[in-house]
Each structure stands twice: as C-alpha cells, then as structure tokens.
C-alpha cells in the first residue's frame, strides 16, 4: 500500500479487509487486500496491472 501511495494513489474506501485506491491522473481503481500475510503472486500481479507499477 505504501508503494501505491508513493505513486500518487490515495485511499477512497475501505470495506472489511480490502482498501480501494484511486489516482488523479490514471484511470480506474485498485483494490488491495489488507496484508496480514504475504499477498499471493496472482493478486500482486493483478495490482501491478491495474496500477501500472512494478511491485516485485
């Protein structure tokens, strides 16, 4: 979540264990599960695709 916030994403909603982020210039939203444990690789790839960031 810190990497998203560092790139300009900001939290717009939180529901249960998931947070939704939005960016002023980039289209769409990114949903991120609360990282109690390691985030599964498929979920991490989805977050990367949605945000345009390389998180690994």
Image: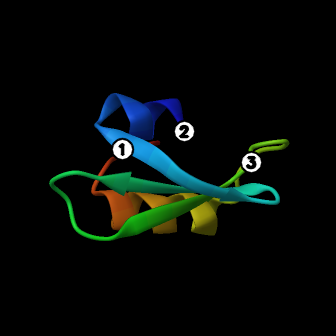
In this rendering, which labeled residue sits more in front, label 1 or label 2?
Answer: 1
Of labels 3 and 2, earlier in sequence is: 2
Determine contact: label 1, label 2, CB under 8 Å: no
Vertical position of residue 36 compared to residue 31: above or below = above
Q: At which x and y percent is residue 40?
A: 70, 59
Q: Which quarter of the picture shows residue 9? A: top left
Question: In the picture provided, is 33 more to the left or to the right than 31?
Answer: right
Gap between marks 1 and 3 measured at Cα: 16 Å
Q: Which mark is residue 1?
A: 2
Q: At which x and y percent is residue 16?
A: 82, 60
Of labels 1 and 3, earlier in sequence is: 1
Q: Residue at 59%, 57% (x, y): give it.
A: 13
Q: At which x and y percent is residue 44?
A: 55, 57
Pick the front one: 31 or 53? 31
Vertical position of residue 16 compared to residue 24: above or below = below
Q: SS class of the residue under badge 2? A: loop
Question: In the picture provided, is 19 more to the left or to the right than 23?
Answer: right
Q: Which mark is residue 26?
A: none
Gap between marks 1 and 2 measured at Cα: 9 Å
Q: Residue at 36%, 66% (x, y): give it.
A: 49
Label 1 crowd bin: few (<14), some (14–19), many (20+), radius 10 Å: many
In this rendering, which labeled residue sits more in front, label 1 or label 3?
Answer: 1
Provide the residue designation for mark 3: 34
Q: What coloring was used for the rendering?
A: rainbow
Q: Residue at 83%, 43% (x, y): give it.
A: 37
Q: Which quarter of the picture shows residue 7? A: top left
Of labels 1 and 2, earlier in sequence is: 2
Q: Which mark is residue 9?
A: 1
Gap between marks 3 and 2 measured at Cα: 9 Å
């Amino acid at each position: 979540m810190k990497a998203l916030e560092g790139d300009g994403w900001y939290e717009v909603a939180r529901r249960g264990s998931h947070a939704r982020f939005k960016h002023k210039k980039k289209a769409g939203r990114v949903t991120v599960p609360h990282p109690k444990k390691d985030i599964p690789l498929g979920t991490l790839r989805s977050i990367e695709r949605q945000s345009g960031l390389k998180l690994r």
